[in-house]
Image (spheres, helix red, strand yellow):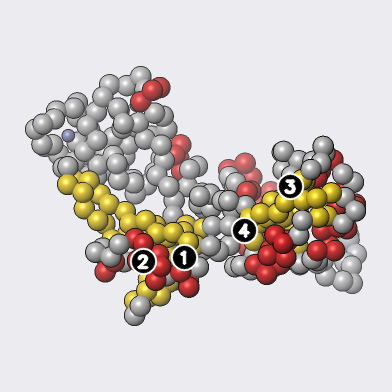
Amino acid sequence: MEPSDYWYDLETLNVADICNIGSLDISESSKTKKKKRPYQKFSEEFPELPETVQNNSKFIIITAKNSTKTISEFSCFAVHRALNIISKEIISISTLRDGNLLILVKTKDVAEKFLKTDRLHGICEIVAKYHEALNFVKGIPYAPYLINIPEAEIKAELKSQNVHDVFKFTRTNEGVIKPTGVILVTFDLYNLPSKQDICWHTVKVREYIPNPMRCKNCQKLGHTPKFCKNTAMCCTCNLPPHAPTTCTRTECANCADKHPASSPCAKPKSSTSSNNKPYRQK
Ligand SMILES: [Zn+2]
Ligand SMILES: [Zn+2]
Ligand SMILES: [Zn+2]
């Protein structure tokens, strides 16, 4: 297998994933390249381990205020020193395209310290705020006992478990909207919890993978009706549109399985599987 067969989106990988890539690359290269490497003397010390990302690690954006320059235009040495004066508990720093800084700090307490700061020592005034999307992860527990409870009540009751938002999925079948029992939960956490306690129920929290873009004209994945060159098809039976008569069969336009094109396919085609990346963006 060629290394190019692997596809990763580095932005969405966590530390564990990055470690996996490292080990995978080594094993692949040792299989394919059989050349003997020159003898290397191992250093006495182990290399430094990557910083641990905790579940309450936070992403913060730092912007220069009342300044003609962006933060990245100041000396990176001076900026780095000034950031460390506020706190040394920083996991990573990166420069954004607009010249602002994105920093990942170890805990929420450290993040609050940055948010209260209005000046980078000896550099400029700053505004620090939480990143709007990166601090949230989305999961989908199945909790049919919540079907009749309003979303606002579920959200309020689960607030202590870092639940930031709740959305109950519904399914429309022949014009009737029915709840599915599956709930989209947005957690104010770095990693998605594998389980969640809802009163006396313990539920498995699966990772939320948003449905890929589907054309409402031909039902195929990967484009919108505006760019569709195919003939119109019924979402449920994959035959030419026939309303108001009911469908005579159920067939997906994308995988030909017995489900409507609006439901996710069990085995997405390789062309659409690239959309299946961990969902962090809000
Ligand atoms: Zn189409
Ligand atoms: Zn139909
Ligand atoms: Zn399908």
Badge 2 marks a residue whose secondary structure is helix
Q: CA distance from mark 4 to mark 2?
A: 29 Å
Query: Which label belongs to residue 163?
Result: 1
Q: Are marks 3 and 4 in contact (CB under 8 Å)?
A: no
Badge 4 marks a residue whose secondary structure is loop
Residue indicated by mark 3? 63
Q: CA distance from mark 3 to mark 2?
A: 36 Å
Badge 1 marks a residue whose secondary structure is strand
Place of residue 26 in the rendered image (x, y in percent of width and height, measured from the top left) = 71, 56
Q: Quadrant of residue 252?
A: top left
Query: Which label belongs to residue 14?
Result: 4
Place of residue 248 in the rendered image (x, y in percent of width and height, measured from the top left) = 11, 37
Query: Which label belongs to residue 78?
Result: none
Circle 2: residue type: Ile
> Which badge, 4 or 2, is on the more N-terminal residue?
4
Q: Are marks 1 and 3 in contact (CB under 8 Å)?
A: no
Q: CA distance from mark 3 to mark 4?
A: 25 Å
Q: Are marks 2 and 1 in contact (CB under 8 Å)?
A: yes
Circle 4: residue type: Asn
Q: Can you see residue 248?
A: yes
Q: Are marks 4 and 2 in contact (CB under 8 Å)?
A: no
> Which badge, 3 or 4, is on the more N-terminal residue?
4
Q: CA distance from mark 1 to mark 3?
A: 28 Å
Report the front residue among 174 and 60: 60
Q: CA distance from mark 2 to mark 1?
A: 9 Å
Dot 3 alpha-carbon crowd within 10 angstroms: few under 14, some 14 to 19, many 20 or more = many
> Which badge, 2 or 1, is on the more N-terminal residue?
2
Q: Nearer the viewer, mark 4 or mark 2?
A: 2
